[in-house]
Image (tube, rainbow, N blue to C red):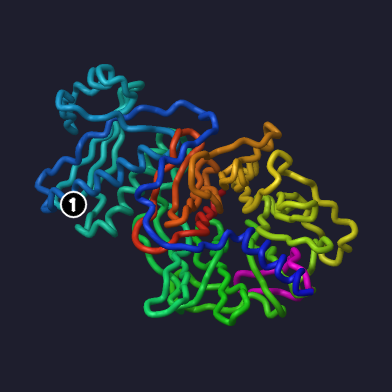
Amino acid sequence: MKKKLKLTITLIASLLALPLTVGSAEDQEQIVVQLPTECRLLPLYMEEVEDASSGLSASYLKKLEEVLGFDLNHNGMTYCVKRNPSNVKVTLDSATYPKICRDMNVYYLIKTQVKDKKLAVRMYSANNKSVKGIDGLLLTGDIKKDRLQMHHVADVIHKELFGKPGIASTHFLYTVRNKIPGQNNWASEVWEADYDGGNARQLTRGGEYCITPSYIPPHKGHASGSFFYVSYKSGQPKVFLASLHDEKTQRFSFLKGNQLMPAINRQRDHVAFISDATGNPDLFLQTFSPEEGSVGKPQQIFTSYLATQGSPCFSPDGKKIAFVSNKDGSPRIYLMEVPPMGQKMKKVQPQLLTRYNHESTAPAWSPDGTKIAYCARTEGVRQIWVYDFNRNEERQLTSGPGNKENPTWAPNSLHLIFNSSDSNASELYLINLNQPSAVKISSGQGEKRFPNWEPRSDV
C-alpha cells in the first residue's frame, strides 16, 4: 500500500509539474515556435505619439506608445515596420500618406495624438485611401490605468482590419511561488494580469499554497467575475471558488481525500476534477451552478486499475473531456464523451489522442474546438505541442532549453501563454501561431506558473 501511495504522489506531482526553485529567467535562451505560420503578417507604420500640448510627460507618452506598439506587434496579424531618421512625419491632416505608404511598403499608417489629456487615433488606409479614427479617449496620467485605453485602441484597430475582436483587453490568471521569509516553507498565491503581463495584481493573500487557478466563464456580454483554484491550506489539496472582486472564498466539494485540477465547461453547468476519494486518483464530474455552487453529488466517470488520471479539460461544446492517464504505461492524453449522470463506467471507452509522444500532460482545448495544446517530454525537455483535429496530426510548437508547460489558449484560438522553467526560475511566455518566437511577459520575484486565459463571453 505504501509503494502504491508513493507512486501515486509521484505521478500527481509529474502531472502538475510543481515548481521547485525560484530565481530570474532574464538569461533564458529564446524560445522558438516550430509550427509553420498560418498567414502572412500585415505591415503597419506607427508614428510616434504626438504631444499636442498634452500636459503629460514625455516619458509617460513613450510608455503609452510602447503598450500600443506591443499590441500591434503581437496580435498575430500585424507588425510595425521599424522607424528610421528619414521617415516623414505623418500629421493628422496629411495629404501625403498614400505616397508614404508606398515608399515604406505598408498598408496602413497609425497616428496617435494627445491634447489636453485626451487621446486621438487615426488610421490611414493605402488601399481605399480612407481615414478612420477614435477621438476623446480621456487619459489620467496613470500608466496603469491608461494602458487599458491603449489596449482598447489596439482591439478597435484589430476589429476594423480583420472583423474579429483582438485580445489586448483580455487577462489571465497564474500563480506566483515564493519562499516564506525566515521559514523553510513556500507560499504560492493566485495573481491576475493583462494579457501582456502588465497590471499584475495579487488575488489570494492567505499565505497558503495555491495552484491551477481557472476562470469561471461569464454570462454573455459580461466579464468573468470568479475563479476556481486549489489550495493546500488544510494539508490536503482542496478546490475553492473565489471572487475576482473581493477575498470571499468557498469550498467547491466536501469529498474526503485530495481534490485537484478543476475544469469547468463553457456552459457553466459541469465541473470535471481529479479526486482520490475512492482510493485512486480518478476523474469525477460535478453538476454546478455559478450562483449556487455544487449541485448534488459528484459522479466518478473514469478509473483504471493502479493508474493516475489528471488535467481534465472540456471541448468548447461541453460534450467531450480531454484528460491525462498513465493507464497504458506513461502519461498520455485521452478523449471521452461526457457521460450522462448515472451511466456505468464500464461503458466509457476513452480514445487515445497523443500517439507520437509517450509522456504528454496538461491538455488545453482551443476555444474554436480545432486544436488541443499540451506539453510532452521531447528529447528530455518538456515542450509545447499542438494536436490539430483538422489535419489529424501532432506538431511540435516549441524547442530549446527549459521545461515548457501548462499552455492556455486565448479566446481567438491563435495565442498561447505557457510557463517555462529551468533550475533557476519559472516565467510566463506569450506566443501565437503566426509568429516565429515567444516573448516573456512576466516580471518580478517568484516562480510564475499555471496560467489560465480569461474566456470571452462572445466565443
**Residue shown at 51%/73% (left/top)?**
209
Looking at the rendered structure, the kind of residue marked 1 is Tyr
**Which x, y percent locates residue 244?**
46, 69
List x then y, in percent, for residue 70: 33, 42
Q: Nearer the viewer, residue 61 or 284?
A: 284
Q: Residue 146: where, in percent of width, then height?
A: 27, 55
Number of residue marks: 1
Q: Is residue 291 magenta?
A: yes
> 459 or 341: which is nearer to us?
341
Q: Which residue is mark 1?
A: 60
> Which residues fall within the magenta stretch?
279-297
Can you say whether 360 is above or below 271 in the image?
above
Residue at image point 66% right, 58% down: 311
Residue 440 lies in the magenta-colored region: no
Q: Quadrant of the N terminus?
A: bottom right
Q: Is residue 334 above or below residue 186?
A: above
Residue under the point 23% across and 43% down: 120
Q: In the displayed image of the protein, which residue is found farthest to the front?
A: 3
